[in-house]
Amino acid sequence: MANHSPVGSQHHIVPVKTYLVTWLILLVLMSATIAASYVQLPGVGNNIVALIIATIKAVLVVMVFMGVKYSTKLVKIWAMIGFIWVTFIFGILIDYATRIPVSGFNSDFSTTVPRKAEVAGQPSPPQDQSTGYVAPTDNPKLKAQLGQ
Amino acid sequence: MATNIQEAALEVHDDHHHGPLKHQYEDIDQQNETYIVGMWSFLVTEVMFFGALFLGYVLMRWEYSNDFYISHFQTEVFWGGLNTTVLLSSSFSMALAVHFAQLKEPKKVIAGLCVTLLGAFCFLGVKSHEYLVKIADHHVPGPSFIPPAGTTHNGSQMFFSLYFMMTGLHGIHVIIGAICITTLIILWAKRKPVVTEDYVPTEMVGLYWHFVDLVWIFLFPLFYLIPK
């Protein structure tokens, strides 16, 4: 067991240059993800691009900054296991995607509770805010705005 | 006889307490690996509960995609991008602090940690500005909530609930990180052997700080850059 390395018991020291390059790549990727968000891609393209860039950034942080790349296999397993679990739990989306919407879980929120403004017979709030529940308020400015 | 045993015990004691190596470990590498695995098992629990929140986000955005799209214009890309830059840079300075902790250069470690701490305060400052804007706009879920124009009440409220829940939880992590970094700076400034002889305490706070950065890397596109 006592397999002492000749260098002495030193952890692998990552050169400053590696950190510097990683940091610059991360900043470039951040700019890329902001730029990509202003381009309208077909379908879910924008989501995929944003998540791929975020994943690359995450891998860079975990591997270089957190030093997993230079760690032992045991540390690598521990570092991966949480992220593997997250991908497993996202498997629950298969259930939501394949289930026939009997009532839709949206309806539970939107229709069972009557909207207060409608019940009380208050005048409708301005057009741009007419879409939902409007609670009474003590703020005089807001009161005028809502027509309460 | 008794004194002999005591002397022997003292000798053993001396043998095993050179430097940071604790007596139950074979060598310093095994000790360090144990510490790092312990820290990572804590980070796994963090990944798990943030993961559940991200799943909740995906389900709600699926259900209210239009509301999420319109509501996300209330978050400003400029502030989000600034905070991303700040966190990425503070992660870099934290990595440098750990690097110099390995090389046992206290002054550079303290400099790196101070830059990281400055990043933490800068992040929290920007975040509180954003929160104050949303409070002033009545975008905090609750009785005084006013949905942004063109959204349904439930959908936009769900967006802001997730926004405050996830960025708030992340913000708490930033505060805890700042407290840990401050403690480290004090320990390094006093040249305490617990940090100067063993780089692992610095490394662990570093791991925590990088994890905070990691969460923000996903929060930023999901709340500031939502496509239609």
Image: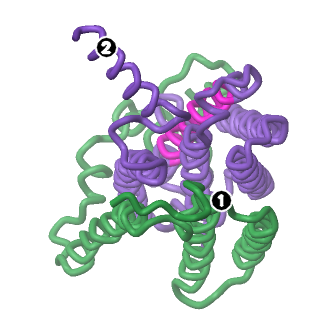
Chain colours: A green, B purple
* Number of other residues with Cα within 10 Å of mark 1, as a class: few under 14, some 14 to 19, many 20 or more: many
Kindly identify the residue that appears in the image at 79 percent across and 62 percent down.
A16
Q: In the rendered structure, which segment of residues is drawn in magenta?
A: B163-184
Q: Main secondary structure of the magenta part?
A: helix
Identify the subunit bearing mark 1. Answer: B
Q: Which tag is nearer the camera, tag 1 or tag 2?
A: 2
User: Residue B86, how many percent across, how many down?
Assistant: 77, 50
Residue B140 to residue B220: above or below = above
Residue B182 lies in the magenta-colored region: yes
Q: Position of residue B46 (x, y in %)?
A: 41, 48
Q: Position of residue B174 (x, y in %)?
A: 61, 37
Residue that badge 2 annotates: B6
Q: Secondary structure at mark 1?
A: helix
**Residue B185 marker:** none
Q: Position of residue A143 (x, y in %)?
A: 61, 25
What is the number of the mark on residue B224? Answer: 1
Q: Given the image, on which type of amino acid does mark 1 rest? A: Tyr
Q: Nearer the viewer, residue A146 or B224?
A: B224
**Residue at screen point 71% across, 47% down:** B94
Q: Which residue appears at 37% of the width and 35% of the height? A: B23
Is residue B164 visible in this depiction of the protein?
Answer: yes
Asked where in the image residue B221 lies, by quadrant, the reply is: bottom right
Label 2 chain ID: B
